[in-house]
Every structure is written in structure tokens, then in C-alpha cells.
Amino acid sequence: MSVLEGRSRKALRAALPCVLASVLLLIAATTKVGVEARQHAEQDQRGRIRSEVNLVGTLTSVLDKDGRPALDLAQDQFEVYEEGVKQKIEIFEPETQQPLDLTLMIDSSLSEIKDLEFETEAASRFIQKLVRPGDRLALYEFADAVTQLAPFSSSVPTLQAALKHIVPGDGTALYDAVYLGSEALARNPSGRRRVIVLVTDAGETTSRADFETARRAALRADALLYTIVVRVVQNEGGRNTAGEHALETISDSTGGATYFPNTIGELGEMFDRIDRELRTQYRLGYYPNPRPPDGAYRALEVRVHCECRVRSRKAYYTGGHLD
């Protein structure tokens, strides 16, 4: 062996530990990158799966035996079922502070003319009490057609002033009022509660929309419908009982309510009930399992373990193309 070869082998043996260390570091780094990449991919996949299944939210009103809001209920007292299948509640907000978008629809048909002044005064007080910072209200009148008097606004004076522009008209486009109020709410950004308050004698004469079109529009908009039926006469023979039953059905399916004041003097109390209920609602949210098809209405039920009455929407629309 030459002197040169001996020196080369000695140099190689001396450098070998460093080379091995470098290789091990490279393997470790590669493994770490691979693991992190795999974990990141799994996280992305989970994120995509979660984002593809939309959160379903529902507002729930819980009333005690005396009809007062039942407060301080715990999450484990609530159960949510979709198409009869129990769901895992992911969001629970007692007395939700989620802001309101509300369409106030005033019946200005000739049958309502004698009570119209009192109705507008009660509506004005309702606007004053209801609209808080972050909330928005739009005002409409309806007779033979539906007319917007004020767009969505948080300005109480502007909304109250718009009430003075109500003009009595012929006919009553009742279903159109529900349909167009729902459509107006559906155009607003998500993440806000959507509510329709309808003041009417429940007559229906001139709508282009029918009952089912109005009901489905309210469900698709995720809107609660609260109806105050001002009866022109108390005896059943002179009332619009068909319209009353129709409004009760739509209100019930959305999770809202229908009120029947015995006298026009009780109208303010009805508005107060609606305001109180909107301030004491429970907000629930879940990711539906199994995943529902697009373009379908899904049955929804909220159960509460207490001696109380529960109001929540009975169905929701999954989005996508409506068959």
C-alpha cells in the first residue's frame, strides 16, 4: 500500500462519522416533513369535509306553563333531530345576542282602515323598543300589492316616520307579503336572525303567490314568522278563518307564533310578547349527519327536557337546486 493510499483511507475513516450523522439528519428531516405534510393533508381534508357540510342553525323559544320564557336551561336539556335522527349540538347560545333583520308588514287594506291609526301607533312603539344597535328593520305595507316604505335600517326615527306614509288600498295580498318579506330577508348577509312580523286581519284576495309558495319562501329564508291577527269581528261567521289557519300553519312551521288580540287595545301587548321572545331565544347549531342531499326540505325537531312548550322551525332547506 502506498503512503498516499494510507492517508486517503485514514481521511475516509475520519470523515465517516460526519457523513453518517449528515445522512441520519437528512432522513430525520425528510421523515418529519413527510409526517407534517401528511398531518397537514389530513387537517385540510377534515377542513374540507367540515366546510362541505353546512352548519344548520335553529332558533328555539321555550315557554313555561304560564307562557313566560323559560330561562337558564342547560345544553344537555336540549335534543335536536333531523329526519328522526338525533344530532350532535355544536353550538348552544342561551339568550342569543345574534343581531336581528326584521321585516314589519302592515295590512293597509280597507278592512283595516278603522284600526290603522292605532296599529301604526303600536308599531311605532314596537320599533322604538325592538331596534337595538346592530339590528335592522324594513317596513312594508300591503293591500292589493306589497309596497316597501323603508329599507333595512337601524334608524328608529326614520322607520317611525315611514309609518306615516301608509295609504289604505283595495284587496289584501297576504301570501305576497309573506313571500316578499322572506325574499327581502334572504338577500341579506347570513349570520343574522331573520324575522317577519305581520299585522293583518288574515284576509287574502289578490296574491300572486299561493300558500305553499309563501310557506316555502319563509323556510328557505330561515325566517321566523310572527303574525298578529286583528279580527274585525269576533264571531267566526264574519272572520277570515281560512286565512287565520293558513297563517297559523306557516308561523308554526317556521318556529314563530300567531297572536289573536281580543281587542285592538291589546295590540301593544302582542308586540311586547314578540320583543320579549326574540330577546330570550336559544340558538342551536349542528352539522347534519348523515349529510342531506341538496335541494331538499328536511324535517327538524327540537326537544327540551322540562315542563315547557317548545317552538322551533319544523323544517329547513338544504340549498342547491330545488326539485
Image (cartoon, helix red, strand yellow):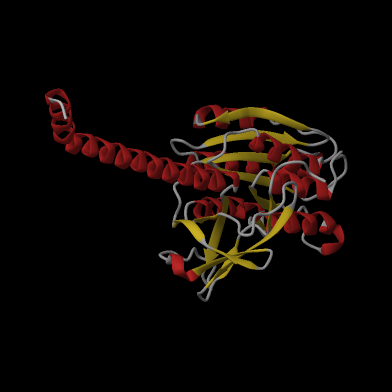
Task: Return the residue nearer the eye: 43 or 51.
Answer: 43
Residue at 15% across, 26% down: 2
Q: Position of residue 55 (x, y in %)?
A: 56, 49
Task: Return the residue nearer the eye: 106 or 238.
Answer: 106
Quarter-of-image position of residue 19: top left
Quarter-of-image position of residue 138: top right
Q: Position of residue 117 (x, y in %)?
A: 66, 39
Residue at 74% across, 37% down: 180
- Asked whether residue 203 appears in the rendered view, the answer is no
Residue that extends furthest to the bottom in the rendered view of this protein: 307
Residue 21, compared with residue 50, is above or below; it is: above
Q: Position of residue 62 (x, y in %)?
A: 53, 64
Quarter-of-image position of residue 273: bottom right
Q: Position of residue 7 (x, y in %)?
A: 13, 27
Task: Return the residue nearer the eye: 311 or 112.
Answer: 311
Residue at 73% across, 58% down: 248
Residue 189, compared with residue 285, is above or below; it is: above
- Asked whether residue 226 appears in the rendered view, the answer is yes
Task: Return the residue nearer the eye: 215 or 319.
Answer: 319
State which quarter of the image contains the N terminus.
top left
Residue 147, compared with residue 281, is above or below; it is: above
